[in-house]
Image: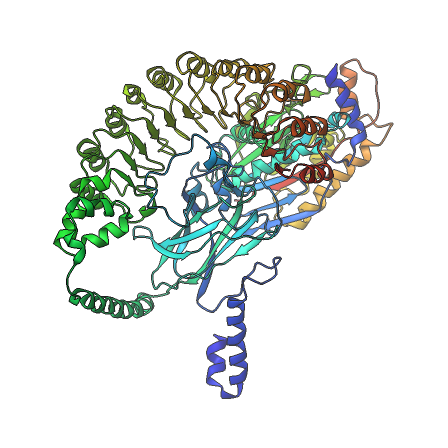
Amino acid sequence: MDLVASLTNSNHNDEYKQLIAEKQNVFEGISEIDNTEYEIKLRPGAIEQFVQSVLSYSSKYNSISSILYAPENLIGKPSKYPMYGDFPDTYLLRSYGKWWKESEAAQPEYMPHDVDPIPSEDFVTVRFEYAVFPKDVFIYETYHPGAVVRIWGRKYGNPWNLLWKGPPQTCPVASRKYSPPIRQIKELINELRIEFNQSHLRYHTSLDAILLTGFRPKSLLQMTILQKGLLDTFVKESCERREQLQCFNDDGVDLFCNLPFEVMVHIFQYLDLKSLCRCAQVNKKWYFVSLDPALYRAISLKKYWHKVDNKIIQDFMNKCKNVKKLDLSWCSNEKQIKEVVFVQFLEQCCKNITHLSLDCCSFINTIVLGEIGKCNDLTDLRLRNCKRSVKDFGPLAQLHKLTALDLCSSCITDEQLINILKANTNLKHLIIDFCDYLETLDQVAETVSMFNPYLVTWSSWKTLSFTSEGIGHLARCSYLRELDLGWCLILNEPANCIEKISLGCKDLRRLIISGWRGVNDHLLLPLIRSCKQLTQLDLLGIKNISSDICERILASLPKLTLLDISFCDLIKTEQVLIWREQYPNVVIQH
Amino acid sequence: MFRRQYRELIGLDVDGVDSMVVRAEVEVVKDRELVRDRVTRVKASGSGSSGVAEACAKPCFTIVDGVADGVGGWRAYGIDPGEFSLHLMQTCERLVGIGRFTPSNPSELLARSYYELLQHKKAILGSSTACVVVLNKENCMLYTANIGDSGFMVVRHGKVIHKSEEQQHYFNTPFQLSLPPPGYQANVLSDQPDSAITNNFPVEDGDVILVATDGVFDNLPQSLLIKELCKVQGERCASRLQTVANSIAWMARNLSFDETFISPFAESAFANGINTIGGKPDDITVILATVAI
């Protein structure tokens, strides 16, 4: 209002200009504004809003039901910013650095020639109360910032728009309010999807809040005016493109077509999916070559999650004959793919499929699992983050060649898992993190020790029903190299299970026993004596371990590269600094 | 016994770390129509639906108050006794804030909060009594859950409508939620969150609700307490509530140091065959609220 008033009065013209300049400065300078002030002045008509609800996510530190370190902590105003640290009331991502990718159980790349230069490793989707024309997005990062690589926006029900994309950032050790320059789209949005790449970070990253600012149209007229500008520019763009295409088509003879069909197919094998689709549009011959099923033995659509729907899958159905590896992770977070279509695809094109990954796919249900159970050749199955309503994993027991099984965050029950384990005696990697329906893990471990002698990886992070005796069973798996038992024995006595494991699994490379409050120096001694191959050791949150034992760990484990002793109260920071200098090859988290 | 030692030690803890000392912080939340006086650790409001999304969309229909009193004996074991109770209540507050609770089931809230403590990266150890009351404005019901000797009292026109029962294993040893240090499990009393006494009853406009630690109930005779609470029957002015809350806390504090006074604690001790006289210096926390519908 005061803007209008000053406009009409020419005497105040300078004042008005100044005011405008000020307001603009506020916007341009927002990223540098000192950290303590997070009240942002806005132009008239603009609103700012914090997250109203969290819709989905791919990674979480704590168990499903817990609110500590949970994505729900993004809701509302920042609670910790501008403080910096590892706070339980912020959203903490589970993985960081290269450690998870270096695990033997990590999913291999299905299409090594179609890898994103800046791959997104995790995502979180949030909703805001009002749909706005976005102006700025502020991300409040309170611990190890710098992992945000993409920001998507949309109005519920519409396709996603990429608002910003950039490489992960190297940041100083301080909290920050990150506001990358987002694309000014003339579309209303009320949902944001933030994607992360934590591979360069030294430790877990955590987010406190997300602020979306923008213009909220007050009337339909205002809205149409704001959008119309966009339509014009769009028309122009497509015209330009068409002109370019025409120029291209005028160009003479296609020498490439003289190559034999097989040679062309061979060359095409090195192309990523996007290029293949482009090639298909060149001419008839290229089109037929691009349809060759040999090009679609391994498909990974995770990178293209925002484009994938029923039609795309049906399209692939025409090209694919014999898919061996299929990754549809993230592609159907909101049922973009119907289960009928997927089942049909699986039946027609994936008879001999060996690798299947369906992270965050909402179409998974009993029917789909039944169909997956019929894929006899499956060796690598990853069903991370499937819906909590899926309870019947029974059909998976029909598989018998599995070597890797990832059921992270699923509701599988003991009986179903035991049946799967009994049927797949060659199993090497088992990931059952966050599976809170497993009530007798001791029995599961006993089954593993009897039926799966070749087990290399056992990961049961944040499961609740283990006892010391049950963990002891794992000692019979002598090939075991990676053991993630984080938070499995919070208050229970560890008794002699560490000793048993140390003696039984001499080849152990990675051991995670974070949150085992009952561990003390004495219990760790057998580990130091026997497991000389150990490279990673996570002792986070163990109150009773002393500097002495850490000293011995560092001195007597020559291959150690990672030691996490955060929240170990008895170990002093000064001591850690000395160790860091003394053992430069070991990353010590404290 | 192990437990008795704590309670003896607690006598030294007046205004200690494990007490949220009487703080004169007032919050008047007009749209929630409840004038409250805060002298303690938790107060939060939410709609109480289990879904996170609805919690913010709907107006707030419930108001939650609670106190937790840490067991001071843990200091001898190098454990800050205030940490457990503080985190317990903070977690309650956050659970309510994001709507992860059922208004009609405050004991579930306590249980959830307790299990969350286990999952902290930082090892939180200690033990605590706890009392949570939830006012549901939709049906004018008060839902309560109580473990141990902290408690609540509802007064209407000078009459006690409801008072919490103390839960004790034996004299001066209340029920308590606890996370003992590893190796001590066998020696320490630990009650499950589901052992909380729960209750629900209707309240009326103007009712006075007092939630306090045992430091109040052990030192102030009920008659005196009722006299004070009568002063704020139907009171909607926050500062007057504050005054009364302050005076209750001060009276309790002064009486606790009075060595000749026959306090409710001394009476109870006498009934248990222990000859003692005087008040019981302890942590004092008072939350006072009136129902305004």
Q: As drawn, is A34 to the left or to the right of A477?
A: right
Left/right placement of residue A383 relative to residue A502 reads: left
* Count of numbered marks: 0
Residue placed most toward the observer, A516 or A214: A516
Q: How is the image coloured?
A: rainbow
* Residue A115 position within the rendered picture, expressed as x and y whole percent measured from the top left: 36, 46
Q: Position of residue A582 (x, y in %)?
A: 69, 37
Is the residue A9 above or below the residue A272 in the image?
below
Above or below — where is A134 with respect to A413? Answer: below
Question: In this view, which residue lies farthest toward the bottom?
Answer: A11
Which residue is the extreme one toward the top? A450
Quarter holding the N terminus of chain B?
A: top right
Residue B252, horizontal then vertical, whole percent: 77, 35
For the residue pair A51 and B208, the one nearer the viewer reads as A51
Nearer to me, A317 or B60? A317
Identify the residue at the far right of this view. Answer: B260
* Residue A330 seen: yes
- Residue A431 in which image quadrant: top left
Is the residue A543 above or below the residue A453 in the image?
Answer: below
Residue B259, horizontal then vertical, whole percent: 87, 28
At x 41%, y 25%, the residue is: A429
Horizontally, is B237 left or right of A394 in the view? right
Does residue B121 appear in the picture of this structure?
no
Residue at the image position 70 percent from the left and 40 percent from the top: A577
Residue at x 41%, y 46% (from the top left corner): A120
Q: Which one is nearer the viewer's eye here, A579 or A94?
A: A579
